[in-house]
Image: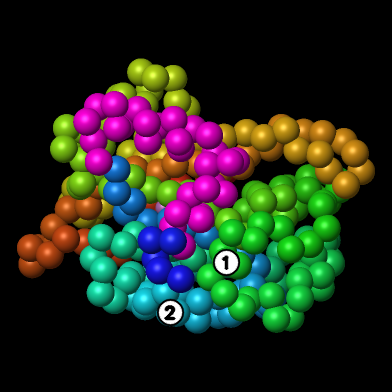
Amino acid sequence: MTPTDFFASLWDRYTQVTPQAHSIQQLFKQQGETVLNDHVAFRTFNNSPISLEKLEPQLEALGYQAYGAFVFESKHLKARCYKHTTEVDSPKIFLSELLVEELPPICQEIIGRYVAQIPTDAVQTPAIFWAGKLWETPTQADYLALAEHSEYAAWLSTMGLQANHFTVSINHLQHLTTIEDVNALLEKEGYALNQVGGVIKGSPESCLEQSSTMADKIDYTFADGSQKIIPSCFYEFARRHPMANGVLFDSFIEGNADKIFDSTSNK
Ligand code: OOG
Ligand code: NI
């Protein structure tokens, strides 16, 4: 599979649950922009057949290599980022995993039941990255119990493995050249932006400015038959700046990422 085919399949699945991403991309195109992706992100469970460690070889098979590692203590997550070894315009990949053993026993018990249902050989091809949920549909009670301790766990229990967000590279836009321009257009069009810590995460000085929409909402039917409006996926916007040595910063920042995770908050 080529990276181009990989991202095309991911985008298909992603826009099915994130119609705003398609609409916003159209909006940018109407402004005469060519939309390139800075990165895409995935979420998963550690100590499972789809752990970060088990997924990584599929990214390597696509020509990707890890170049950064991150820890989010209060969210009980760790993450790595990957870039393509030869194709500079291929989106970067941000892969995080939930450290399940750090959650209270009630959450460990629920997640343990899901993880036990994932085939041990689930990871065979890059198509695993849009496989969705590989376990039974949660009950609303289990979903709410997870959400109380980890919104990431609750989100993952309903959405499974799929692109959690695509990210527009502001650096590649011709007319909307600042993150303020992008945010102003989105707000004018009525999109809700993630306000945690301010709309813009990061600064030119830290070499990375990011903003994101709040996730789209889907009407979800739980295993018990009850329904609830829950967050699906969101769209992100990133502008990179050169470091002191003149090279464009190409990694991620824990302080920014910590707030971007909240784009799937249900509060
Ligand atoms: C990932 C959040 C972090 C970034 O660009 O720093 C992130 C997530 O929400 O799964 O995307
Ligand atoms: Ni991101």
Say which residue appears at 64% left-offset and 73% top-offset: 50
Say which residue appears at 21% left-offset and 61% top-offset: 249
Residue 207 in picture, x, y percent from top left: 21, 54
Quadrant housing residue 86: bottom left
Residue 125 in picture, x, y percent from top left: 57, 74
Does residue 253 appear to the left or right of 104 in the view shown?
A: left
Residue 138 in picture, x, y percent from top left: 82, 51
Residue 189 visible (yes or no)? yes
Name the dominant secondary structure of the magenta segment: helix
Q: How crowded is mark 1: few (under 14 residues within 10 Å), some or many (20 or more)?
A: some
The local secondary structure at tag 2 comes to: helix
Q: What residue type is labelled 2?
A: Glu
Q: How far apart are marks 2 and 1 (CA)?
A: 14 Å
Say which residue appears at 74% left-offset and 63% top-offset: 134
- Nearer the camera: disc 2 or disc 1: 1
Does residue 167 appear to the left or right of 35 in the view shown?
A: right
Residue identifier under label 2: 60
Q: Is the C-beta of the residue carrying label 2 under 8 Å from the nearest atom of ligand 1?
A: no
Residue identifier under label 1: 127
Stretch in magenta: 6-34
Say which residue appears at 81% left-offset and 73% top-offset: 116
Residue 19 in picture, x, y percent from top left: 53, 34
**Vertical order, 75 against 181 (above or below):** below
**Vertical order, 238 against 24 (above or below):** below
